[in-house]
Amino acid sequence: MKSLKSSIVRWYVYFKRGHSNYFVFALSLLNFIVIQYRLLIEHAPLIRGLIDSLQTFTIVFLSLYIPISILTGWIDTKRGTLPKENEVNPYFIKPIAKERITMPLILEMAKILEQIAEKQRLDVEEMRIMRRKVEDWLRLNSNN
């Protein structure tokens, strides 16, 4: 019985990933194309004379839409909101729950390693700098 239950849960997770990541994306794009075709072609006689079928409209639409979308995404990534957010807040990437749990443990281990290295008279300054950066990052982002 447990095997059947775990299989059903696993299938559900697979379904959600496949549905939301792939099929909904494709279906929403196709839905958008059909709606735009109906709105543009049926209500614009000038365009209706140039584009006579849904297939022609789809080819024209995708040949314009895909490059424009790629260009818009590139501009946003390189010159838009992402670089501006990084300028304003260098700690833009927020720690997730796993990091909030594991980072304190890792920091404690780093402190212990520093103490051991100091006893053996090794240079620990670089390790100390990195540990402080992580502590500052956690401190700044733990309130969000």
Image (cartoon, rainbow, N blue to C red):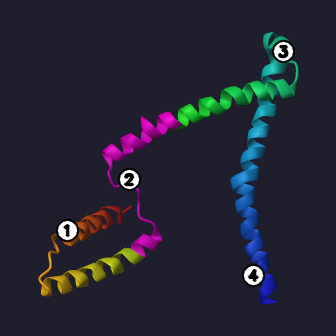
Q: Is the magenta stretch mostly helix, strand or loop?
A: helix
Q: Give the range drawn in magenta.
A: 74-101
Q: Which residue type carries mark 3?
A: Arg
Which labelled disc corresponds to residue 126?
1
* Separation (CA) of disc 4 from disc 1: 47 Å
Looking at the image, tell me whether mark 4 or mark 3 is earlier in sequence order: 4
Is label 1 in contact with label 2 (beta carbons under 8 Å)?
Answer: no
Q: In this view, does 30 lie above or below 101?
A: above
Local secondary structure at mark 3: helix
**Is 123 left, or right, of 46 in this rendering?**
left
Looking at the image, tell me whether mark 1 or mark 2 is earlier in sequence order: 2
Residue 111 horizontal/vertical position (percent): 23, 80
Residue at image mark 3: 48
Which labelled disc corresponds to residue 52?
none
Q: Residues within 10 Å of mark 2 (few under 14, many from 20)?
A: few
Seen as rendered, the residue at the extreme bottom is 1
Q: Which residue type carries mark 4?
A: Ser
User: Picture quarter containing residue 132?
Assistant: bottom left
Looking at the image, tell me whether mark 3 or mark 1 is earlier in sequence order: 3
Tell me the quadrant of the picture where the C terminus can be found.
bottom left
In magenta segment, residue 86: yes
Q: Is residue 12 above or below residue 60?
A: below
* Separation (CA) of disc 4 from disc 2: 37 Å
